[in-house]
Image (spheres, rainbow, N blue to C red):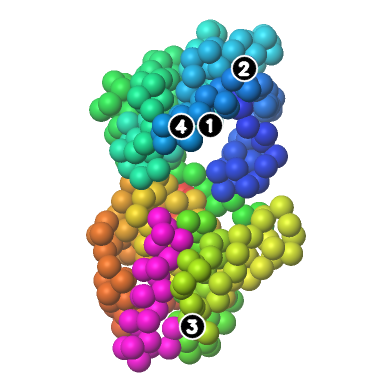
């Protein structure tokens, strides 16, 4: 097939959406498809809408989303229409915005991780959205769903919202999880070698990756380690991607590495090293629409300890590639879950089934 891939974002930025916008078009092309990228789409009246956003922020202490402005989206549709050609077989968009107003006889497919109905209620920093942002967002999602032949969501959580909140026809909704965005992930033989090396290490190595210390639950991860050590289990933790508050002093058994850029080879290699060395991945997040980093943990055979919140339950199947804990689980519950896994003495099987989930679903 020849697919027109449309986006308002530069597709070669591996940092955007944890690399998802970079990886997905390449994954589609790898399945004998020809992908024409109509990117990036230019934002009409950019200065005006950016100024409007700043005004709301500083004058009214509200958050305004210009990405849902109808004038911008109609112009996106115009730009796409002008570049579609007769031998395109379909139009594909990551998220709903580029195709919300698109008029075409071609099939339209979009892939998203949530709906505005979920985002506006789920994330704390969305609680201050302007009413026009919310209204425009609902309208954008609704008409995009109506225009699309297939609406793909990364989780069951998001797919249910599309059906319930926007009247999407169930037969036109698909759930396809996003995948790991680290190139050259290990194969099963390499995973088995890594497992043997991990088992030679007497201390339990935990890994946490996230850019928001509070929302991602780094403080809970730190407390979990302290509980495990108080229970006589030698445990170390590596925190990647964020730094603690200025008044928070980390003990010497916790290593803190700031944000790692996958575009930088040295930093990518360091990220791979920490994924290879860890026994378990922990992410006590307070809000998570999906959790691509959990896919990456599974790629390296790391069972993940995460809360059953948002779309993350599509990523982690409890007992297969990790453990789902209650949404409001405390550090003591994470510690106990890790202790239980340790007592079962089947780390190799758990790590291999985690990698299998990556191979079958999370790639």
Question: Residue at the location (59% across, 69% down)?
Answer: 257
How far apart in space, not on screen, are marks 3 and 2 (Cα)?
50 Å
Task: Give the labeled residue for mark 3.
Answer: 251
Task: Tell which circle, 4 or 2, labels the residue nearer the N-terminal end.
Answer: 2
Task: Tell which circle, 4 or 3, labels the residue nearer the N-terminal end.
Answer: 4
- At mark 4, the secondary structure is helix
Q: Are marks 3 and 2 in contact (CB under 8 Å)?
A: no
- At mark 2, the secondary structure is loop
Question: Residue at the location (46% across, 73% down)?
Answer: 248
Task: Give the labeled residue for mark 4.
Answer: 59
Q: Are marks 4 and 3 in contact (CB under 8 Å)?
A: no
**Residue furthest right in the image:** 265
Q: Position of residue 353 (x, y in %)?
A: 43, 64
* Picture quarter with the N terminus: top right
Residue 143 visible, this angle:
yes
Task: Give the labeled residue for mark 2.
Answer: 45
Badge 3: few (under 14), some or many (20 or more) residues near its Cα, within 10 Å? Answer: few
Q: Specify the segment rendered in magenta.
A: 213-235
Task: Tell which circle, 1 or 3, labels the residue nearer the N-terminal end.
Answer: 1
Task: Tell which circle, 4 or 1, labels the residue nearer the N-terminal end.
Answer: 1
Q: Are marks 4 and 1 in contact (CB under 8 Å)?
A: no
How far apart in space, not on screen, are marks 1 and 2 (Cα)?
15 Å
* Foreground: disc 4 or disc 1: 4
Task: Give the labeled residue for mark 1.
Answer: 54
Question: Residue at the location (52% across, 24% down)?
Answer: 52
Badge 2: few (under 14), some or many (20 or more) residues near its Cα, within 10 Å? Answer: few
């Amino acid at each position: 097939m020849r697919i027109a891939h449309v986006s308002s974002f530069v597709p070669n930025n591996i940092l955007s959406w944890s690399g998802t916008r970079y990886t997905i078009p390449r994954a589609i092309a790898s399945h004998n498809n020809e992908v024409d990228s109509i990117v990036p789409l230019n934002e009409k009246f950019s200065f005006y809408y950016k100024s409007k956003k700043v005004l709301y922020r500083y004058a009214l202490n509200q958050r305004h989303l210009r990405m849902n402005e109808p004038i911008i989206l109609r112009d996106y549709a115009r730009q796409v229409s002008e570049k579609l050609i007769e031998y395109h077989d379909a139009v594909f968009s990551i998220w709903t915005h580029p195709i919300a107003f698109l008029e075409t006889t071609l099939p339209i497919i979009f892939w998203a991780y949530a709906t505005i109905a979920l985002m506006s209620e789920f994330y704390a920093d969305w609680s201050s959205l302007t009413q026009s942002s919310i209204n425009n967002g609902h309208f954008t999602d609704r008409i995009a769903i109506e225009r699309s032949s297939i609406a793909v969501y990364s989780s069951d959580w998001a797919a249910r919202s599309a059906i319930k909140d926007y009247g999407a026809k169930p037969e036109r909704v698909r759930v396809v999880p996003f995948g790991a965005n680290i190139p050259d992930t290990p194969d099963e033989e390499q995973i088995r070698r890594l497992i043997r090396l991990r088992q030679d290490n007497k201390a339990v190595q935990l890994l946490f990756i996230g850019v928001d210390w509070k929302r991602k639950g780094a403080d809970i991860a730190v407390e979990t380690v302290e509980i495990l050590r108080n229970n006589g289990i030698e445990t170390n933790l590596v925190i990647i991607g964020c730094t603690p508050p200025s008044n928070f002093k980390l003990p010497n058994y916790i290593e803190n590495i700031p944000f790692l850029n996958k575009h930088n080879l040295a930093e990518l290699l360091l990220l791979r090293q920490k994924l290879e060395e860890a026994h378990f991945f922990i992410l006590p997040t307070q809000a998570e629409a999906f959790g691509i980093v959990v896919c990456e943990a599974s790629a390296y055979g790391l069972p993940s300890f995460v809360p059953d919140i948002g779309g993350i339950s599509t990523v982690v199947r409890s007992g297969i590639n990790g453990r789902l804990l209650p949404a409001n689980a405390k550090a003591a519950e994470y510690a106990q879950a890790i202790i239980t896994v340790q007592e079962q003495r089947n780390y190799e099987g758990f790590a291999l089934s985690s990698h299998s989930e990556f191979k079958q679903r999370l790639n």
